[in-house]
Image (cartoon, rainbow, N blue to C red):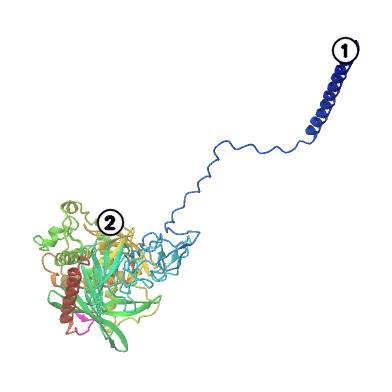
Amino acid sequence: MKFLKIFSKTIASFLVLLLVGACAITAGAQGTNNNNKKQNPPPKPPPKNTSTPPKTPPPPPKTPPPTNTGGNKTPTSNPQNGTKNTGNNPNTGNNPNTGNKTPTTNPHNGTKNTGNTANTGNTTNTGNKTPTTNPQNGVKNTGINPTGGNNGGGRNAGNNPNTGGRNNGNNTGGRNGVNQPGGNTHTVTTHSGAVATVNSNGKVTQIVNHGTVINRGVNGTRTIVTPLPNGGRVVTTGAHGGYVQNTFVRNNQTFVSRTYVYGGRSFVRVYQPFTYHGFVYNRYLPGFYYRPAFYGWAFSPWGIGISFSWGWGGAAWFGFYGGYFQPYPVYVGPTLWLTDYLLAANLQLAYENQQANGAPPPGPDAQTQQVELSPEVKQAIADEIQRQLASEQTQSAAPNGSIPQANGNMVPAALDPQMSTIVVTENLQVTDNGQPCELTPGDVLTRIDDNPGPDNAVMAKVTNSKPGDCRAGALPRVQVSDLQDMMNQFQAQVDSGVQQLAAQQGKNGIPPAPGGSTTVVQGPGQAPPDPNAANLLQQQQKNADAVEAEIKTNGSGNQ
């Protein structure tokens, strides 16, 4: 019994030792394993995704199709014609090229906007930042179609946008009736084939009808030019007046004659064509001369001041422009008398043209704001009259009023550095800061440039102007051919004034001229009138009335 107790205790102790040993071995193995884990830790398994997965960031917003404002670097596709929009500048008024499926209308020529840039005769504008030069008129291509010269666009009468002037083409320095400065315009073709240019206000500014060109100025005045088969032309410069131009040869020299018709009265003026720097101009030739002594009297002071009654007091034109023009109270010499004669003749013409064409007169405010021609401006005109009288005195002394031979060195009177003051003698549309405005007879310009630019135009300052015309101080570019026409008219009007002065000398307070000096000598400016001039002008005006009525009836604009 005692043995069994001892054996049981021994077995229990042994088991305890075994258990302690096993624990020690287990602890040692665990320590070794921990050391190994510290030296080479196994890759941790990815943690379980117990949160909501993050959302994918939204794609960047789509860039809207670029508005075609010029210089785009990335060409965009224009589904209108399958060609690429190469970043052209705004193409003469087209809507932004956003790839619309519906073609848009180009108001400059009425054709569909197909994304192409050849719309004014320019080379394709491929996004270049520097404006290119338009060889049609020497002005920069700024993406605006200057109403004409549309070699690559719609039909616009084939006119050359010569910066507001009337391109003489090869026609001895006269008009060709093409005169449409810039602006938002479109063209409309009638059933009869006439092409009308309509501005953004719905007003018809030009019509081309089978060669005849009809221009409507800002103030509504109308000019019509029709070429003749013989190379001449019929030109209406007002509602009831104009001229027929032809050429003729005398003594192996070519001359230009114009038969003018105004108020049922016809008269002829003759011009000598000449070339200067590649352009053809007309030079006025007097139809008569007086004796040299008369011209000496006419450009010399009288020595006393005289009063002269013109009889204009009740005339409508004189009252209308009373704030712009007042005659001298006294005259100390013939040139001042001739200055008032010339200005009055042009203002009367401007008033008649305005009334005949139905142009609305300026409002009361404009009437009261008229700026009177200054003594300095009138003196500048008188000085030019004196120079012309001196020139005619020299010519009158030549045998039979011989004509100086024209040559390439002859400078047009319009560019003579000594003759920079120019009286406007006919309606002329120009641009002032990109906007069209009109000059009418009696306005006064001062030429700024003596040398024309590539467009054969010079800058001129509007020294004085009447209400409704281009503002005083404007600096339009004017074609040399237009200025030359004005100088020719100026010289012819001076001759008419000299004729009146010769008739008045010794009367109404005017001192007498030297005895025998008023004898008339025939000058080189003689030619027979065109017997059909009145009929041609009447038919031209009738045809123009009909085509304007057709356009108005079709709702294409208003005159």
Q: Is residue 426 left or right of residue 21?
A: left
Please check the rendered image and state whether residue 521 is part of the magenta-colored stretch, yes or no. Answer: yes
Q: Nearer the viewer, residue 411 or 150?
A: 150
Q: Position of residue 418 (x, y in %)?
A: 34, 66
Pointers 1 and 2 in contact (C-beta within 8 Å): no
Residue marked by disc 2? 472
Q: Quadrant of residue 290?
A: bottom left
Q: Position of residue 523 (x, y in %)?
A: 24, 81
Outermost residue on the front side: it is: 1
Q: Nearer the viewer, residue 228 or 311?
A: 228
Q: Nearer the viewer, residue 389 or 181?
A: 181
Tell me the quarter of the image containing the C terminus.
bottom left
Q: Secondary structure at mark 2?
A: loop
Mark closer to the chain start, 1 or 2 = 1
Q: Is residue 228 left or right of residue 91?
A: left
Q: Secondary structure at mark 1?
A: helix
For the record, the magenta segment spans: 520-529
* Residue under the image location 15 percent in, 81 percent down: 535
Please check the rendered image and state whether residue 349 is part of the magenta-colored stretch, yes or no. Answer: no
Q: Position of residue 87 (x, y in %)?
A: 46, 61
Please indicate, yes or no, whether residue 82 appears anywhere in the rendered image.
yes
Callout 2 amino acid? Ala
Check the image and report above or below for 55 versus 196: above
Q: Main secondary structure of the magenta part?
A: loop
Residue marked by disc 1? 5
Q: Quadrant of residue 160?
A: bottom left
Outermost residue on the top side: it is: 2
Q: Quadrant of residue 353?
A: bottom left
